[in-house]
C-alpha cells in the first residue's frame, strides 16, 4: 500500500513538473511572438520612412544602387534577429537538458544511496553484538595506549593454575614498571575512584557510551567528578587487589558491554 502511494506521489510530482515546464514554454513562445511582432512593426515603419524619403528625393532614391542597399540592409537585420532568437532558444534548450540530467543523476544517486544503506544495514545485522560494538566505537572514538609496556594477558578465556588468575579475562593486562605513569586513553569524566574488590585501586572514566577502567594502580591522581583530557596523567602502575605483579588491567565497555580493547587499540 505504501509503495503504491509512493508511486502515485511520484506520478503527481512528475505531472506538476511537466505542467510548470509546459506553462513556462507557452509563456516563452508568447514573448517570442510579441518580440517578433514589435520588430516587424519597426521594420515596417522604417520602410514607410524610406518610401516618404523616396518620394521627396526621387532623383536619387529610386536609383538601382540605393534600392539594392536598402533591401540588403533589411535582409541582414532580419537574419541577425532570427540568429539571436535561435541562439537564445538553443541556450534555453541546453539549460533544460542540463537540469533534466541533474535531476536524473540526483534520483539515481538517491536510489544508489538507499540501496547502499540497505546493504550496509543488512551486513551490520549479520555481525555479532561485540562486532557491532567495535564497529561503532571505531567510527566515533580514538584511543591512545594508557601505559607503555608489554601485553601479559589478553581479553577472553584463559587457563591457569594460579587461583588469582580468573578463567575469563575482562580486559587486557599491560606489564609495566611499578610506578609507571598511567594516562587517560580517552577524554571524559571520572565516575569512580575506588580501592575495593579484585581491581584494587582503580579508576573509571566515562565518555558518552564508553567507560574505560584502569585497575591495580599504586597511586591515583584524580577524583570522582573530575574532567580529564586524553593523555592526562591519572595514576601509577601497581599491584593492588587481585594481581600477581605490577601491571595495568585496562578495560573498555560500550553501553555497559565488555569489548576486547585490542580490537580498538594496539597493544604490543
Image (cartoon, helix red, strand yellow):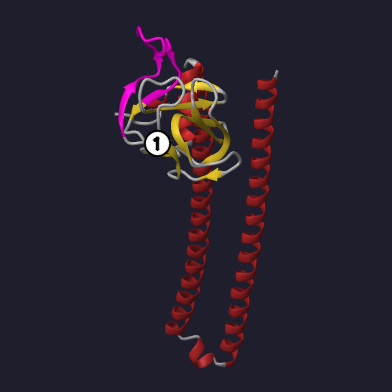
Indicate whether 191 appears above or below 156.
below
Disc 1 crowd, CA 10 A, few/some/many (<14, 14-19, 20+)? many
Q: Is residue 163 magenta?
A: yes
Q: Quadrant of the N terminus?
A: top right
The magenta segment is 149-173
**Which residue is drawn at the image coordinates 32% and 32% (left, top)?**
176
Q: Secondary structure at mark 1?
A: loop
Q: Quadrant of the C terminus?
A: top left
Residue at which label 1 appears? 146
Magenta-highlighted stretch: main secondary structure? Answer: loop
Judge by depth and name the residue closer to the eye, 71 or 123: 123
Residue 41: image location, x then y, percent? 64, 72
**Which residue is drawn at the image coordinates 59% and 79% (left, top)?**
46
Res. 245 in view? yes
Res. 116 in view? no
**Which residue is drawn at the image coordinates 52% and 67% (left, top)?**
81
Residue 138 in the figure: left or right of residue 206: left
Judge by depth and name the residue closer to the eye, 67 or 78: 78
Residue 149: image location, x then y, percent? 31, 32
Give the tally of numbered discs: 1
Amino acid at each position: 500500500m505504501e509503495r503504491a502511494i509512493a508511486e502515485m506521489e511520484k506520478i503527481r510530482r512528475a505531472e506538476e513538473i511537466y505542467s510548470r515546464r509546459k506553462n513556462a514554454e507557452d509563456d516563452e513562445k508568447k514573448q517570442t511572438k510579441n518580440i517578433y511582432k514589435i520588430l516587424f512593426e519597426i521594420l515596417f515603419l522604417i520602410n514607410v520612412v524610406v518610401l516618404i524619403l523616396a518620394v521627396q528625393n526621387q532623383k536619387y532614391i529610386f536609383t538601382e544602387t540605393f534600392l539594392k542597399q536598402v533591401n540588403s540592409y533589411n535582409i541582414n537585420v532580419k537574419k541577425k534577429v532570427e540568429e539571436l532568437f535561435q541562439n537564445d532558444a538553443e541556450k534555453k534548450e541546453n539549460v533544460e537538458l542540463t537540469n533534466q540530467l541533474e535531476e536524473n543523476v540526483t534520483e539515481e544517486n538517491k536510489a544508489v544511496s538507499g540501496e547502499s544503506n540497505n546493504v550496509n544495514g543488512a551486513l551490520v545485522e549479520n555481525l555479532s553484538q561485540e562486532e557491532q560494538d567495535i564497529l561503532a566505537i571505531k567510527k566515533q572514538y580514538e584511543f591512545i595506549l594508557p601505559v607503555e609496556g608489554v601485553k601479559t594477558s589478553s581479553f577472553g578465556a584463559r587457563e591457569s593454575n594460579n587461583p588469582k588468575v580468573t578463567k575469563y579475562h575482562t580486559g587486557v593486562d599491560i606489564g609495566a614498571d611499578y610506578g609507571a605513569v598511567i594516562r587517560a586513553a580517552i577524554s571524559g569524566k571520572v565516575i569512580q575512584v575506588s580501592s575495593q574488590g579484585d581491581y584494587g585501586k582503580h579508576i573509571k572514566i566515562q565518555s558518552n557510551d564508553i567507560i574505560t577502567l584502569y585497575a591495580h594502580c599504586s597511586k591515583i591522581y584524580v577524583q570522582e567528578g573530575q574532567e580529564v583530557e586524553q593523555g592526562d596523567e591519572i595514576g601509577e602502575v601497581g599491584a593492588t587487589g587481585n594481581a600477581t605483579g605490577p601491571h595495568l588491567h585496562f578495560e573498555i565497555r560500550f553501553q555497559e558491554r565488555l569489548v576486547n580493547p585490542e580490537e580498538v587499540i594496539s597493544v604490543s
